[in-house]
Structure formats: structure tokens, C-alpha cells
Image: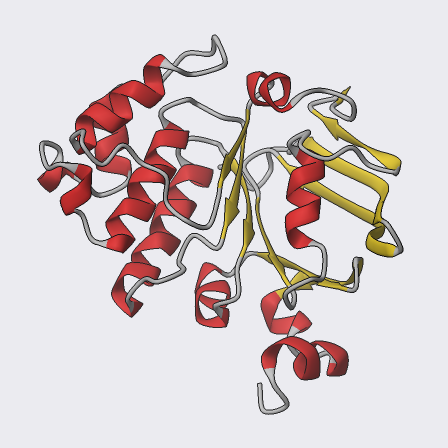
Amino acid sequence: MNGGAQATATLLRVEQVSRDFGGLRALDGVDLAVDDGEVLCIIGPNGCGKTTLFNVITGQVAPGAGRVVFDGQTLSGLSPDRVARRGVARKFQVPSVFEDLTVRENLGVARFAAPSKAELPEVDSVLSEIGLDDCADTLAVELSHGRKQWLEIGMLLAQAPRLMLLDEPTAGMTGAETLATVGLIRRASQQAGTACVVVEHDMRFVEALDARVLVMLAGRVVADGRFADVRRLPAVREAYLGRRA
């Protein structure tokens, strides 16, 4: 992860996962792999299967076929709490923080409730990592929407996950906050060694993050590569980025 000659291990594998809801195939033979400390962006229109994929990985929905393997062990069939104890943390699109507690207290609660027995970072180090040192004693209700998003990511980091699943972490952010979020995710990957899978619609964010990009359409993976390469594909340009992208 930090050294060019250092080999990385595959942390997450999704193998030929399919899932139907009635007559709708939400996932159709999805394959993906994420290495330790890697950042992966998943893009695609609403209804393409991104949320269902996250639900399958976290144990909220069982796959109809295929399996999810995390750190060499099969997750399929495990309850969400058991998946979390393996080191998988998830952030939903709408921030979920304790608004009547301070920023520091929110991080402390998350750290105390960590599902894993792994060595946990100190609250002050998480405050620095998410850039909220200046408002540690501010009530969460007083934070801007963007800072609430950062706080929730910090609450995940306080639990020392191996993998974070982030659902539209820049939704509702200003341009400056969006760029700052790029730095936050990079630090989580490079310094904490946390792998991150990010679902995002903001192509400015995806481009700035400069990570591997996986494109989904109708429950299938239709492209997988660097953003600069993926955006040139005709189907991707028309379906996700616009004809002029």
C-alpha cells in the first residue's frame, strides 16, 4: 500500500453475485475485488444495483447466487452485526450522528461501541484525520451538512475498520468540502490502511479522487478501470457522464 514494491493482498472479493427481487434482477453475476488499503469508486444511474451490492456485502440482503469473501472468509449468510465484527463499516447517504453530543463525544461513543476488538485509534488522532480539530467541543447539531458527513466517516474510522463502504459521502457538500473529502478518503487509505468502496454520482469528486472506477448498469459491471480510461467508453459517456464528457 505505501511501498511500490510491497505486494498487496485482496481483502474483499464479490464472486458472481446475483440477486432477484420478484421479477427484477438487481444484481446479475457481479464480480469485483478490492485490495487492502485500496479505494474503489462505483458509479452508475439510480437503480443499477449499487445499494443492493452494499446490502449484500454487509449481510442485510442474502445473495441469490454467488458469494462474498472478506479477508479469506465467506461473509454470505452472516448477519450484519457479525459482518461488522469482521471489520466492515458502512456509511449511508444521510448523515447519522448524535446531534445533542459534541464532535468529540460522537467519536468517543463510536469508539466505545466498536464491534471489533482491534486496536482502536485515539479520538484526537481521528479528529485530526477528519479535519475537525477546531470544533471538537461543538455540538454536532451546529455543524454544516458537509462537516456532519466528515464526522460520520470519523465515527467509522474510530472503530478501526478494515473496509469502509461509503454511500454518496459528498452529497450536499460545497465544492471546497467535496475536495476536502477527497483528502480525507486518501488519508484513510494511505495512513490508516483502510480500504474504501465509494458509491458516488459527483463526477468531479470521482475524477479528483483518481481511484479505480467500476461502472454498473442494470445490475452488471460494464467497465472497470481508471477514471480517465473509463470515461472514454461510449456506453459510459452516454449513460453516466453525458455525451460531452
Residue 88 seen in the current view: yes
Residue at (35, 53) in percent of width and height: 181
Q: Is residue 92 above or below residue 194?
A: below
Residue at (47, 68) in percent of width and height: 202
The answer to whether residue 180 is left or right of residue 182 is left
- State the residue lying farthest toward the front: 22
Q: Is residue 218 above or below residue 183?
A: below
The C terminus appears in which quarter of the rendering? bottom right
The answer to whether residue 138 is left or right of residue 213 is left
Pinpoint residue 27: horizontal percent, then vertical percent: 81, 51
The N terminus appears in which quarter of the rendering? top right
Residue at (60, 37) in percent of width and height: 5
Which quadrant of the structure image shows residue 243?
bottom right
Pinpoint residue 124: horizontal percent, then vertical percent: 20, 25
Residue 1 seen in the current view: no
Q: Is residue 66 above or below residue 231?
A: above
Q: What is the basis of the colouring in this image?
A: secondary structure
Pinpoint residue 130: horizontal percent, then vertical percent: 28, 41
The answer to whether residue 121 is left or right of residue 70 is left
Pinpoint residue 9: horizontal percent, then vertical percent: 68, 30
Give the camera-side residue of 62 and 154.
62
Which quadrant of the structure image shows residue 81?
top right
- State the residue lying farthest toward the top: 117
Give the camera-side residue of 11 and 166.
166
The answer to whether residue 121 is left or right of residue 4 is left
How many numbered discs sit on the rendered protein?
A: 0
Residue at (64, 42) in percent of width and height: 54
